[in-house]
Amino acid sequence: MTRLAPPLKTSLATSAYPETGLKKWSGAAYRPYWLLLVLALVIRFATALLFHQPGYTDAYYYSNVAESLWRGQGFREDYIWNYLARPLPETAVGNPGSLYWMPLTSVLIYFAYLLTGGPSFLASQLPGILFSAALAPLAFYLATTIFGPAARGRRYGWLAGWLVIFSGIYAGYFVLPDNFAPFALLSAAFLAVITRTLQRLAANRPGIYRRAALAGLLAGLAYLTRVDGLILVAVPFLVGFLQWPRLKPVRPLALKAGLIMLALFGLTVSPWLFRNLADTGQLFPGGGFKVLFWREYNDFFSFSKPLDLPYYLNLTQPAPDWGLGPLLGSKLSALLENLLIVGRGALFLTPLFVIGLFTREAAAGQASPEAPVGSQPFLWQRLEFQPFLVYTLLLYLAMSLAFTFPGTRGSVFHSSGGLLPYIFLVCLVGLDRVIAWLGKLSRPRATAARQRNYSLVVAIAFVCLSVGLVFSMLGNWNKDYEELRPVGAWLDANEKPDVVVMLPLGPAYWYVTHRPSVATASDPLPVNLEIARKYRARYLVLLPDHYPDSFAGLFATKKAPGFELVATFGEVQLYRLA
């Protein structure tokens, strides 16, 4: 009598009767993703409830455009908040919106308004809450695909997901009506998809073209969120160059995949470019290229400076404090500042990130037990991390050497949120490496327990720091909003609704009062009076923390030709313009 062989043990991934539909997505294999997502949503909503106003210009701006969409007025703004675009607008009201900043964040907020029945601050926070919460399960996915689905990969997945949920310096900003969270998720997803595409190319496996198409779609959506998304398009080509020996046998496939990605990118962004062309006669009408020629950040708000190459080289409007030395000095300073800004994502884990990059290990499933450690690649050499590192380097260099002044004033910070899942995974590798070194000094058999315990300590410390950073943001968060409310009340009592006001915070002023305005320029007072005449502005508002240097004398003495002080609201000053 023959013995029956015992039934084969099958995993969830290789079951003879694979689960389908809802049962599949609710199965044990997907449970970590759902748990991380739910926990992230709870933390994000709790964080969102701490804030009651957008708090700064970018968030006010995106909320305003979304409200214009909700009111059926399209991409429109009833204020002029900078003078980069040429030709200049004819009036302060009814101008095309989203020329300098991209439209997708406002579109997402608009959908939230539709979903919740109208504009509200909490509704404007929903896209940030949802998009940033999705980063946590993405971190788990990256950990288990890079380091394998065994115990180590899952431990990294849970820890990286936990760190992403609390997200350090980004914890407060992810829940605001800004592009932090949408760009973070789109850029991180792009890097994950392009990595899988390159892996399939190297192995000549099917599914290359549809992943390349998805990457093009994600890059296009990222570009419609931030112009920096254009950097993503260059990443696969540079990584392909670095991996050329592996990809050389599949050169035709690589070329077709690259063209498919570019085609989907073009299809995604083209409707917006055609809208720009129809409304302004230009594909890129926001004056963003002038950012390349700033001598200082205040050039953002200049009315009279040409902001072109001769100006940048000090050939026109020469200044004694600008020239080759200050130009190079600004680049070196930006390189240092942006390095610190990128490092802020890891906070106190930054040393572990450096150690992790130079830790040797082969890809999951490729390590040979007999292979010496010295023959294995460094982490930074592995294909799974090269798209992330190439994007980080491109972003860092572009924002330091080209877009020097905006780079240090928020552009790098806005564009680095999608790096967090990768940063945390590298940090966890570095932490395990340090613990392994400790095992060589004492109790080597305790290394595994140390890795679990020390990882938990690091995660708790990171959570405490993240919570502290959120509460540190709340101190003066409503200050601009509260300062503008009495200005709006005074104008409601004394002026018509369409009276134009000059002030530095046009988006915040419109959010509070729904009144038109033009921006104060960084030029001298006579130039500002010229702007006021051009746009028929009758009042000037000076807020204590937001006025150009050229207004310092007026703010201190309350006297200047053409300016008549008519009211004060605490430190806020309201002038009638002659």
Image: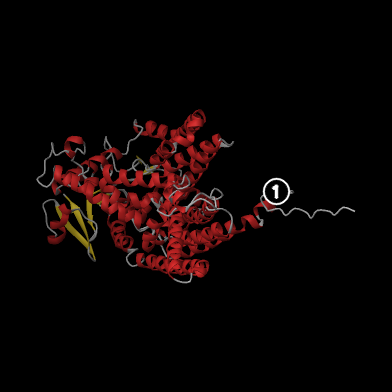
Q: Is residue 80 visible?
A: no
Seen at 50% across and 54% down, the residue is 139
Q: Nearer the viewer, residue 349 or 400?
A: 349
Q: Amino acid at mark 1?
A: Thr
Q: Is residue 55 visible?
A: yes
Seen at 31% across and 63% down, the residue is 479
Q: Is residue 326 above or below residue 466?
A: above
Q: Is residue 133 above or below residue 229?
A: below
Please state the horizontal and vertical placement of residue 238, each as a whole percent of the image.
Answer: 40, 38
Q: Is residue 494 left or right of residue 43?
A: left
Of all residues, the one furthest to the right in this rendering is 1
Please state the horizontal and vertical placement of residue 194, each as a whole percent of the image.
Answer: 49, 41
Q: Nearer the viewer, residue 124 or 91?
A: 124
Instruction: Name the quadrant containing residue 208.
Output: top right
Please state the horizontal and vertical placement of residue 304, each as a whole percent of the image.
Answer: 18, 40
Q: Nearer the viewer, residue 109 or 485?
A: 109
Q: Nearer the viewer, residue 226 or 334?
A: 334
| Mark 1 Cα shell of 10 Å, populated few (<14), some (14-19), many (≥20) | few
Of all residues, the one furthest to the bottom in this rendering is 443
Q: Is residue 363 above or below residue 306?
A: below
| Residue matched to label 1 | 20
Please state the horizontal and vertical placement of residue 531, each as a whole percent of the image.
Answer: 20, 44
Q: How many marks?
A: 1
Circle 1 sits in a helix, a strand or a loop, which is it?
loop
Seen at 71% across and 49% down, the residue is 18
